[in-house]
Image: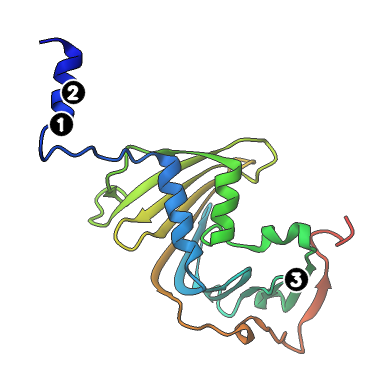
Amino acid sequence: MGLSVFLMMLCLTPGLKAQEIVTAERYLASLSERYGGIRDYEARITIRSGNSTMYGTVSHLVPSFLRIDFTSPANQVIVFNGELLTIYLPEYQAVLNQSVSSNRRAAGTSLATAQGLTLLRRNYVPVFVTGPSPEPLEAGSAERVVKLRLTRKSVSEGFREVVLHISPDSRLIRRIEGRTIDNRFVQFDFSNVKINQGIPEQRFIYDSPASANMYNNFLFRDTD
């Protein structure tokens, strides 16, 4: 029997179904679609960078509202309301404000949002770390995740590479690992994630302590 006849008979065999090949690009697209259906979320967040570890609660509301209330460092706050980035540093009794124009607003969004994932899809090339099957979050961990490694397409991106750890059941980002252009390693962990709880915009209004010193446009001038 010729090879072509054999393949035809194989395809016509009852009960034989073709399995869809899951590529890294398709998996990242489905993750982006998942976050596209999330209006708001709240989660516990842990941020590790160098020898520093920070803990807090992160709140996000579409399109670009973001707030982190830290328990360590205690009372430190980061708020972005789509136009103004505010950072309160209680250790220095200082409030840092930065106005953000429309062409810079993407910088105020988290990677763990629909907007952030859209930027990643546009500016990074994804591959599975080992494959589409879940693997341990880290050595010795019973928690399993799907890992995607994203490599930047151009040198203008802030991260050389980003690794996303996605919980396979909820299809939510469990961990983000990033390596910056100056080769610093940063890790964000999300846990106890609650989605679409009806977070109001008022949560992203921050009243600075009256005793704090104010520093405006500490990153750049809005006209730059």
The residue carrying pointer 1 sits among few (fewer than 14), some (14 to 19) or many (20 or more) residues within 10 Å by Cα, namely: few
Work out how far the residue at label 1 is from the one at label 2, CA to CA, in angstroms.
6 Å
Residue at (34%, 49%) from the top-left corner?
146
* Residue 172 point in image, percent of width and height: 40, 61
Helix, strand or loop at mark 3: loop
Q: Amino acid at mark 2?
A: Met
Viewer-closest of 140 and 122? 122
Q: Is residue 19 above or below residue 55?
A: above
Residue in view at x 74 percent, y 76 percent: 94
Does any portion of residue 52 appear in the rendered image?
A: no
Q: How many marks?
A: 3
Q: Name the residue beneath numbered marker 3.
A: 83
Assess disc 3: are there few (<14), some (14-19) or many (≥20) residues with their C-alpha within 10 Å of its C-alpha: some
- Distance (Cα) linking label 2 and label 3: 60 Å
Classed neighbour count for the residue bearing mark 2: other residues with Cα under 10 Å, few (<14), some (14–19), many (≥20): few
Q: Amino acid at mark 1?
A: Leu
Mark 2 lies on residue: 8
Residue beneath the point at 45% across and 72% down: 43
Q: Amino acid at mark 3?
A: Glu
Q: Quadrant of residue 74?
A: bottom right
Q: Are marks 1 and 2 in contact (CB under 8 Å)?
A: yes
Q: Which residue is mark 1?
A: 12
